[in-house]
Amino acid sequence: MHHLLRTTCVAAGMLGATVGMAVAQPASDRNPFDGFYVGGMVGYDSFHLDNASDLPDFDEENGGFITGLGSDGIAAGAVLGVNMPLSDLFIVGIEGTGRWSDASGNTSVSDNTSETSIEQGNRWSWGVMGRVGMRVSDGMMIYGSGGWGQTRFNTRFINTPAGGSPTTVFDDGVTRDAWRVGGGAEIALGGGWTGRLDYTYSNYGNYDVEINPTNALVVKPEAHQVSVGVSHYF
């Protein structure tokens, strides 16, 4: 969580710097948030992978249950979208996103005979979000968003017997759908360019990772993503 707060503060500082640039831009008759746009974003991903797992073969000492697995990391991606003004004040739009993340995390359990490491990570995400924005000045818009997304999750089990070598006993992935909500602020920088600060929450429901016929990892992913980015309107 402290990583997420630190990233949010940095992102807010970057957005604050762009506010000054936006204020310095001369007023224009053209709505700076109207039309097709493409852009790029960088940020931080924090995935909470709460689970109530039944793993008797791997964690007999603790009754076969493991909790508290999560993954965190840096992310980068691209956006493609279009906005349409409803009035001088309100804007609606739709946006597609693609995102790569190095988010990963691990936990381990042990007994008198072996130690088991569980690694969980996610790499690619994509989705479609609708946006509703309100212009709070000539050069600034705040917006809310909601839609659908998909993420590829990977899980690996590595078992190390006492006095032995590590052995990968499971390595597989699953692609999960999620509903997403979020919001942010976008600021005109001039010349068709805008900067933004964005937050997105995603919920993927529950899924089972079947390690073998007697062991299953029950995962409940939720994601918090904070990003800063720039876009160019055409």
Image: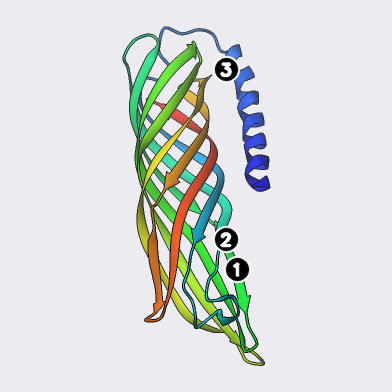
Residue at 58% in and 62% down: 105
The label number, if any, that marks residue 154 in the structure image: none
Image quarter for residue 80?
top left
In the image, what residue type sits under mark 3? Answer: Ala
Question: Residue 68, labelled with which disc?
Answer: 2
The crowd level at tag 3 (other Cα within 10 Å; few <14, some 14-19, many 20+) is: many
Mark toward the start of the polypeptide (2 vs 3): 3
Nearer to me, 42 or 192 = 42
Quick check: 99 left or right of 130?
right
Residues at marks 2 and 1 touching, judged by CB atoms closer than 8 Å: yes
Residue that carries the numbered disc 1 in the rendered image: 107
Give coordinates of residue 139: x percent, y percent: 51, 15
- The residue type indicated by label 2 comes to Gly
Indicate the secondary structure of the residue bearing disc 1. Answer: strand
Residue tagged by mark 3? 22
Q: The residue tagged with tag 3: helix, strand or loop?
A: helix
Q: Residue furthest bottom?
A: 163
Q: How many marks?
A: 3
Q: Which residue appears farthest toward the front when viewing the image? A: 63
- Which is more toward the observer, 169 or 51? 51
Secondary structure of the residue carrying numbered label 2: loop
Q: Quadrant of the C terminus?
A: top left
Within 10 angstroms of label 1, few (less than 14), some, or many (20 or more) residues?
A: some
Residue 114 pos. (x, y %): 61, 86
Q: Nearer the viewer, mark 2 or mark 3?
A: 2
- The amino acid type found where label 1 is placed reads Thr
Closer to the camera in the image, 176 or 193:
176
Identify the residue at image location x=46%, y=73%. 54
Residue for point 47% across, 41% down: 201
